[in-house]
Image: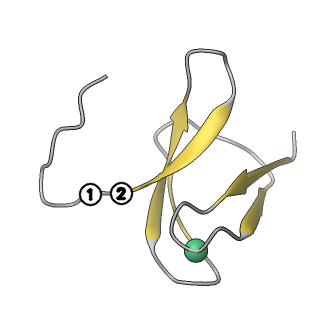
Amino acid sequence: MKIKLKCPECDCEIELEDVIEGEIISCEDCGVDLEVKKKADGTYELVVAESEGEDWGE
Ligand SMILES: [Zn+2]
């Protein structure tokens, strides 16, 4: 399943072959680490992966 998601940092589109919730990918454009998150409506979004233990809640 191919899916396109937007990088929240630079707004470019990232095409993924397979979407795995919780997977960390790197944006090819800006190089930021992004985490795949599943939203309540069943679609996916990319969020900037925080490595400093910041808790965003659910
Ligand atoms: Zn980017």
Q: Is mark 2 on a helix, strand or loop?
A: loop
The answer to whether mark 2 and mark 1 are in CB contact below 8 A is yes
Label 1 Cα crowd, 10 Å radius (few <14 / some 14-19 / many 20+):
few
Q: In this view, does 35 lie above or below 12?
A: above
The colour scheme used here is secondary structure
Residue 38 relative to residue 19: left or right? left
Residue 41 at x, y percent in the picture? 65, 15
Residue 26 relative to residue 19: left or right? left
Residue shown at 21% from the left, 60% from the top: 51
> Which corner quadrant of the image does residue 33 belong to?
bottom left
Name the residue carrying label 1. 50
Q: In this view, does 56 lie above or below 41?
A: below
Given the current orientation, which residue lies at the most extreme right position? 2
Residue shown at 46% from the left, 40% from the top: 22
Q: In which quarter of the image is ligand 1?
A: bottom right
Name the residue carrying label 2. 49
Residue 43 at x, y percent in the picture? 69, 27
Residue 3 at x, y percent in the picture? 82, 46
Number of marks in the rendered image: 2
Q: What element carries label 1?
A: loop
| Callout 1 amino acid | Glu
Residue 31 relative to residue 6: left or right? left
Q: Is residue 45 or residue 19 the one in the foreground? A: 45
